[in-house]
Amino acid sequence: AGGILYMLCCLFQGLSLLLTNSEACRNLLTPSQGHLPEDTNLYFQSSCSMAMGAYCAIAATVLWFVAAITAWMVDPPVRPPITTQTHDVTYTKTTNGADGATIVSENVVKGEPVAVGGRGAEKAF
């Protein structure tokens, strides 16, 4: 999807260069020829030439195109699923007969990783 958006940016950036070949650039867009209302005061130069902005637009068009091709060619990164570890915990309570002290021992058994967030039962790497 990102490649399509980059290609649209490339297209519209390139279309902005069409102004250099338009009637406005050749001073043909005047109120006397009926293109504009009579009370419009727009004056253009007699001809257009490419300046630094046009060269930057050409460079941007090429770079947008390269970005679009790169986005189509490179696969998105794949990361392992987010997992949580399951545990079985057993508590054992024993009483010492001699002095009556109570001892609590804990036994933890680690289980299999479980995928979180509905990604299925994929195993962690």
Image: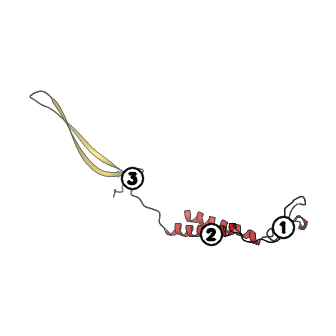
Q: Which residue is mark 3?
A: 82
Q: Which residue is mark 1?
A: 29
Numbered disc 3: secondary structure: loop
Can you tell which quarter of the image residue 57 is in? bottom right
Near mark 2 (Cα within 10 A), the count class, few <14, some 14-19 or many ≥20, is some
In which quadrant of the rendered image does the C terminus lie?
Answer: bottom left
Q: Nearer the viewer, mark 3 or mark 1?
A: 1
- The residue sitting at 15% across, 29% down in the picture is 101
* Amino acid type of the residue tagged 2 in the rendering: Ala
Cα separation, mark 3 vs mark 1, equals 62 Å
Cα separation, mark 2 vs mark 3, equals 41 Å
Q: Position of residue 110 (x, y in %)?
A: 26, 48
Q: Earlier in the sequence, mark 1 or mark 2?
A: 1
* Amino acid type of the residue tagged 3 in the rendering: Ile
In this rendering, would 14 be left or right of 73? right
Per the rendering, the mark at residue 59 is 2
Q: Position of residue 7 (x, y in %)?
A: 60, 67
* Amino acid type of the residue tagged 1 in the rendering: Leu
